[in-house]
């Protein structure tokens, strides 16, 4: 049975989608069968794995309209072992549809139950808000990963986020746990970084991963080329950081895996 992990932070620009996409990619490279669920109407995770979000895609929105099933909506990517439930701007209308549904917080959970056994991990890129889409993700998920930027304002909103998680745990999903906290966009030139990192570790304790994601130009450029950083520049500090993060993640989950030859992992355009 696949483990569902939601990547969440209602503060935008903290590396949430970057972390979700690149962890999903490296997990696939380690031989895990992955479903990436893009639950953000901006569709950045969709474009980040090379899918054109302007084309006619079936999204979570189409599934709740009963226009398709989840199995019909899931698409393969050019990366072996990595599939995606894509997103586009249509998804923005799904919150209005969900409001009218019975058990509206559990819609995604019920949809994912159909395919959960088909994957080792299901990673969900949540929107940068605490609306119904995010609540659906939290209700469906086993654990959450919280990317936090290494800057002063990073701590703002954390109490609100943790309160939402607490309420979901109390009323909707008693088994939800924090998988880990990822420190992102570290700039070693800043004296404030260690101070902020210390405060985050004080708040979350051992949940904070040892691996820290640096600010890296190649990491920032990769999405514009429609590929995760592993396929854009595998030798960059950003790629190596995400590989180390996934190794740490797999060890914590007691899940083995061997890195495949990345040249063989990227399939052809017509695959």
Image (cartoon, helix red, strand yellow):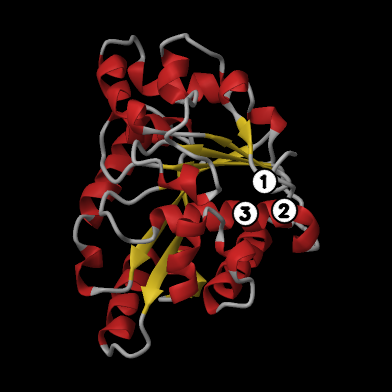
Is 230 placed above or below 188 here?
above
Horizontal arrangement in the rendering, residue 63 relative to residue 252 (left or right) = left
SS at badge 3: helix
Q: Which mark is residue 78?
A: 1
Mark 2 and 3 residues: CB-CB less than 8 Å, in contact? no
Q: Name the quadrant containing residue 12.
A: bottom left
Q: Is residue 72 above or below residue 65?
A: below
Q: Residue at x 25, y 19 (%)?
A: 96
Crowd around label 1: few <14 · some 14–19 · many ≥20 (10 Å): some
Of mark 3 and mark 1, the one earlier in the sequence is: 3
Residue 248: give x, y in percent of width and height: 62, 66
Q: CB atoms at circles 3 and 1 under 8 Å apart? A: no
- Residue 236 appears anywhere in the view: yes
Q: Residues within 10 Å of mark 2 (few under 14, many from 20)?
A: some
Q: Earlier in the sequence, mark 2 or mark 3?
A: 3
The residue lying at 77 percent from left, 62 percent from top is 263
Q: Which residue is mark 2?
A: 266
Question: Residue at 61% across / 32% down in the picture?
Answer: 75
Q: Earlier in the sequence, mark 1 or mark 2?
A: 1
Q: Residue 209: image x %, image y %?
A: 50, 68
Q: In the figure, residue 163 lies in which quadrant? A: top left
Mark seen at residue 30: none
The residue beneath circle 3 is: 25
How far separated are the C-alphas under marks 2 and 3?
Answer: 11 Å
Question: CA–CA distance between discs 1 and 2?
Answer: 6 Å
Nearest the eye: 198 or 113: 113
- Residue visible at 64% across and 71% down in the picture: 234
**Which quadrant of the rendered structure holds the C terminus?**
top right
Q: Secondary structure at mark 2?
A: loop
**Which secondary structure, mark 1?**
loop
The front one of 49 and 268 is 268
Image side of residue 78 versus residue 92, left or right = right
């Amino acid at each position: 049975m696949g483990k569902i992990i939601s990547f969440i932070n209602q503060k935008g620009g903290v590396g949430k989608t970057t972390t979700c996409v690149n962890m999903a990619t490296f997990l696939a490279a380690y031989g895990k069968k992955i479903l990436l669920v893009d639950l953000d109407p901006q569709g950045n995770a969709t474009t980040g794995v090379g899918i054109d979000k302007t084309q006619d895609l079936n999204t979570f929105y189409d599934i709740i309209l009963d226009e398709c099933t989840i199995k019909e909506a899931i698409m393969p990517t050019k990366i072996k072992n990595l599939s995606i439930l894509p997103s586009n701007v249509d998804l923005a209308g799904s919150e209005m549809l969900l409001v009218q549904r019975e058990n509206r917080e559990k819609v995604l959970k019920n949809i994912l139950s159909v395919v959960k056994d088909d994957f080792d991990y299901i990673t969900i890129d949540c929107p940068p808000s605490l609306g119904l889409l995010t609540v659906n993700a939290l209700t469906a998920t086993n654990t959450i990963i919280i990317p936090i930027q290494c800057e002063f304002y990073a701590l703002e909103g954390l109490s609100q986020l943790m309160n939402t998680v607490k309420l979901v745990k109390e009323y909707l999903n008693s088994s939800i746990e924090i998988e880990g906290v990822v420190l992102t966009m570290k700039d070693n030139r800043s004296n404030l970084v260690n101070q902020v990192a210390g405060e985050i570790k004080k708040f979350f304790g051992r949940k904070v991963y040892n691996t820290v994601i640096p600010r890296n130009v190649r990491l920032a450029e990769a999405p514009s080329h429609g590929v995760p950083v592993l396929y854009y520049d595998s030798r960059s500090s950003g790629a190596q950081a995400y590989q180390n993060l996934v190794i740490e993640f797999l060890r914590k989950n007691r899940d083995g895996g061997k890195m495949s030859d990345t040249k063989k992992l990227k399939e052809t355009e017509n695959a």
